[in-house]
Image (cartoon, rainbow, N blue to C red):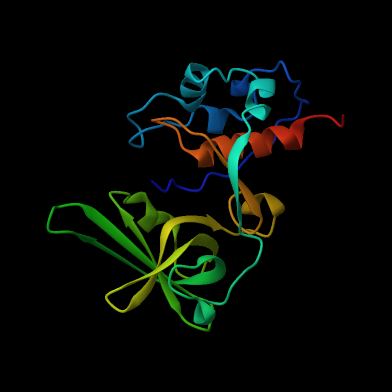
């Protein structure tokens, strides 16, 4: 499931390997897992996986990596390709499916073509992806009813800082996750911890 973008905020004091995961970034560590607001806080789920400190977090090694460092033009995309594109939001459409599920479709363009991002039962997407904002999106290129889409996409709103590309635009680590917490949340916590740790 694609989660809403959360900006990573730095803490003023340096971390240590013995520091609790909760202190890496309280906003991330207390993010509700599972179905939006119904699950436990992220740090509690991590504790159940044996990850309680910064050291535990950094030793939770990625199980694989995805190369998202090369940005493609939408007009050059091929079906089945794993790709990252940078584009602007062209329009947003929100409706209910026949099964009464919320469906939000965000159409983006980079001037060479159009691409759809689809979110089911994630109405928050309609409020985040405003027309004209720039986003970086990674996923598998598919086609549905004649329109290009990205499957299993991860999208980030760009603001000009490096931390805006925690999930896209680089070689991205994929960590082992658990029911109730995504690899995205783990990745954000690792990135934030590495930013705050003193030089070794």
Where's residue 43, x and y in %? 52, 23
Residue with the most extreme left position = 98
Q: Quadrant of the C terminus?
A: top right
Where's residue 22, x and y in %? 59, 22
Residue at image point 36% right, 50% down: 124
Q: Nearer the viewer, residue 1 or 95?
A: 1
Residue at image point 67% right, 23% down: 54
Residue with the most extreme right position = 200
Seen in the image, is 144 located left or right of residue 151? left
Q: Which of 65 and 197 is in front in this view?
A: 65
Determine whether 113 is above or below 61 in the image: below
Residue at image point 52% right, 42% down: 184
Determine whether 63 is above or below 116 in the image: above
Where's residue 21, x and y in %? 61, 22
Residue at image point 61% right, 28% down: 60
Which quadrant of the view contains residue 189? top right
């Amino acid at each position: 499931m694609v989660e809403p973008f959360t900006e990573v905020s730095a803490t003023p004091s340096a971390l240590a390997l013995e520091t609790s995961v909760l202190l890496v970034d309280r906003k991330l560590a207390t993010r509700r897992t599972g179905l939006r607001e119904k699950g436990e806080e992220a740090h509690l789920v991590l504790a159940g996986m044996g990850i309680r400190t910064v050291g535990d977090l950094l030793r939770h090694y990625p199980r694989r990596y995805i190369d998202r460092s090369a940005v493609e033009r939408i007009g050059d995309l091929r079906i089945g390709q794993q790709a990252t594109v940078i584009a602007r939001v062209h329009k947003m459409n929100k409706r209910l499916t026949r099964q009464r599920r919320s469906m939000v479709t965000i159409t983006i363009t980079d001037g060479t073509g159009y691409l759809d991002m689809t979110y089911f039962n994630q109405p928050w997407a309609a409020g985040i992806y405003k027309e004209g904002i720039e986003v970086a999106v990674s996923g598998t290129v598919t086609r549905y009813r004649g329109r290009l889409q990205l499957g299993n996409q991860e999208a980030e709103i760009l603001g000009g800082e490096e931390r805006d590309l925690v999930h896209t635009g680089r070689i991205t680590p994929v960590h082992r996750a658990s029911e109730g917490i995504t690899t995205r949340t783990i990745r954000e916590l690792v990135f934030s911890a590495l930013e705050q740790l003193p030089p070794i």
